[in-house]
Image: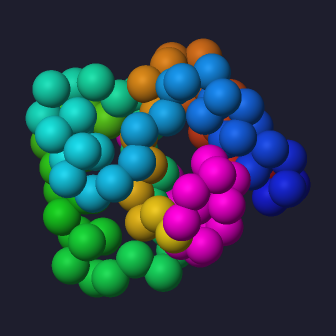
Amino acid sequence: MKQDFYRFLGLATRANKVVSGEDTVMRGIKTKRFHLVLISEDASTNTNKQFYDKCSHYHIPIRQAGTRQALGEAIGKRERVVIGITDKGFSEKMIRMLEQ
């Protein structure tokens, strides 16, 4: 399941529907730019709380999805702790994939 998810995340990246980086994603949450926020399982407690609280406030789904290294590799970058998905279709499919 995980490999399919990471391949799909790579596809979303190539479709230009992915934003990464803590500051950039936080600004996007505040402007309701995202349909889904992905956070790594190895994110710090403070980062987890910060993003879960902000996503809850703005009613944006947030899910844990692998390690920071796996998320970074999936989008062709270095380690990434937080990723925002800007497309509703990609977001819905990713949520279904993570819930399987």
Tell me the colour scheme of the image: rainbow
Give the residues drawn in magenta, as a range.
Answer: 61-78
Would residue 9 be found to the left or right of residue 49 on screen?
right
Report which quarter residue 93 is drawn in.
top right
- Looking at the image, residue 46 lies above or below residue 90: below
Is 74 included in the stretch rendered in magenta?
A: yes
Would residue 36 be found to the left or right of residue 55 on screen?
right
- Looking at the image, residue 40 lies above or below residue 27: below
- Seen as rendered, the residue at the extreme front is 77
Location of residue 66 in the rendering, given as x and y in whole percent from the top left corner: 63, 68
Residue closer to the observer: 27 or 73: 73
The answer to whether residue 3 is seen in the rendering is yes
- Looking at the image, residue 2 lies above or below residue 68: above
Would residue 44 be found to the left or right of residue 57 on screen?
right
Which quadrant does the N terminus fall into? bottom right
Residue closer to the observer: 80 or 98: 80
Location of residue 10 in the rendering, given as x and y in whole percent from the top left corner: 70, 40
- Looking at the image, residue 42 lies above or below residue 76: below
